[in-house]
Amino acid sequence: MSIRRHPWVLLIVLALAACATQAPLRPGPPPLTLLISIDGFRSDYLQRGVTPNISALAADGVRAVAMHPSFPSLTFPNHYTLVTGLRPDRSGIVDNTMEDPRKPGVSFSMGKVDVSHDPFWWDEAEPLWVTAERAGIRTATMFWPGSDLPIRGIQPRDWKMYDKKFSADQRVDQVLAWLDRPAAERPRFVTLYFDEVDTWGHSAGPDSAEVNAALTRTDGSVGRLVAGLKARGLFATANLVIVADHGMAPTSGDQVALLEDLLPTADVHAVSLGPVAGFSAMPGHEGEVAKALLAPHPHMTCWRKGDVPARFHYGHNPRVPPFVCLAETGWVIGAKGRGVNKGSHGFDPYDPLMDALFVAHGPAFRRGVVLKAFDNVDVYPLLARLIGVRARPNDGNLADLAAALAP
Ligand code: AMP
Ligand code: ZN
Ligand code: ZN
């Protein structure tokens, strides 16, 4: 049969070719998006050869040379940025430890659940699980800062109260148990959080054998998850996004900028201390405090909140204290009697030691792509796209990740 004699054949062939390039109809379970955070997984840890499962996902999917955390490079602010697309100054979670002029005398910190579970602190932004639940998409969180309280009145359909003692493998098994439900009751957006790499990074330092062992254990839990997804026939349709909140820098008790050496401590109120610190002056001491803090210091720089460098996008939120100080990487801003860890974070988000992991794998992603460095605000529009909800106004830009997406 020649095409010249039967031109309609060509039309049919062209129509079929056009159909093949459209998104194929995917029978079977609706796609699953898994967001996995490995706290404190510095991006170069991936090159240590101790994480075979995560490395295999990266090789068969996407990894970024680095992902820059948002300022300050701390756990709570960055986890909230990842699921809201808003930098901490706009998300409201401006630090692990913070105060708000609207709640005088109250201090938010991660361990103080009577305060930190008050929606007041979180309601400035809307995390993805809230938006998804509103759109009728079932969500489940196997830990994530903000998931253990209602935000804007909504909580994930399934969630767990944070418990550091709940082991990594138990967390994986809980996620798999949720996925064992009939398809209609299965969550379509799931978070999973691992803390061990960060914990050892602090106590033994980023270059320690302990961190490498923690990396291998956590990688084993990721392997357990992948095996569980495969056994359930869910791996081929699942999109996995594996991130960290920040990196880790070596620190030591020999590199401390002591508050006592700067000014009389009675003149100042320290809202937070560490690689990044926030201060307000005690009434009547504004002049002395400004003079002492804003003077040049060998290993730290302080700004009035309105003068924080623009690249940090920080200082407008009422929760940011009047003075913000940032230590040189490797130094900490401390006070007498305060211990110093062997590793810390909170430093300049553009310092390579603060670079965070980004790996993605699944049908939405190309294979074998290495993305150039990007800011972690871009993860939110990516997740919104994967889940199929409209991204709320945010600071990210999906175009930065275009090279990662399958056509
Ligand atoms: P950081 O001090 O910034 O290194 O914070 C890391 C710590 O945050 C981890 O060791 C966890 O114990 C803690 N953490 C993580 N998620 C939560 C949560 N949802 N609630 C309370 N604490 C948490
Ligand atoms: Zn962290
Ligand atoms: Zn940490």
Image (cartoon, rainbow, N blue to C red):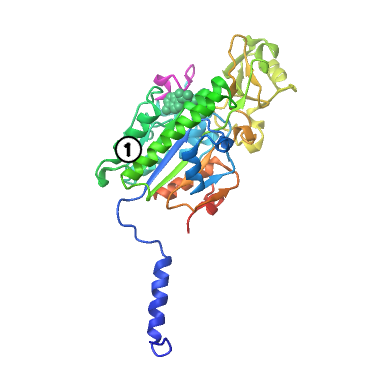
Bounds of the magenta span?
104-117
Residue at 54% over, 38% down: 357
Q: Is residue 105 magenta?
A: yes
Secondary structure type for disc 1 = helix
Establish if 192 lies above or below 335. below
Residue at which label 1 appears:
176
Q: Amino acid at mark 1?
A: Leu
The N terminus sits in image quarter: bottom left
**Label 1 environment density (alpha carbons within 10 Å; few <14, some 14–19, many ≥20):** some
Residue 101: x and y, percent? 51, 23
Res. 217 image quadrant:
top left
Residue 339: x and y, percent? 58, 13
Res. 309 image quadrant:
top right
Q: Is residue 69 visible?
A: no
What number of labels is visible?
A: 1
| Residue found at the far left of this picture | 182
Foreground residue among 13 and 223 = 223
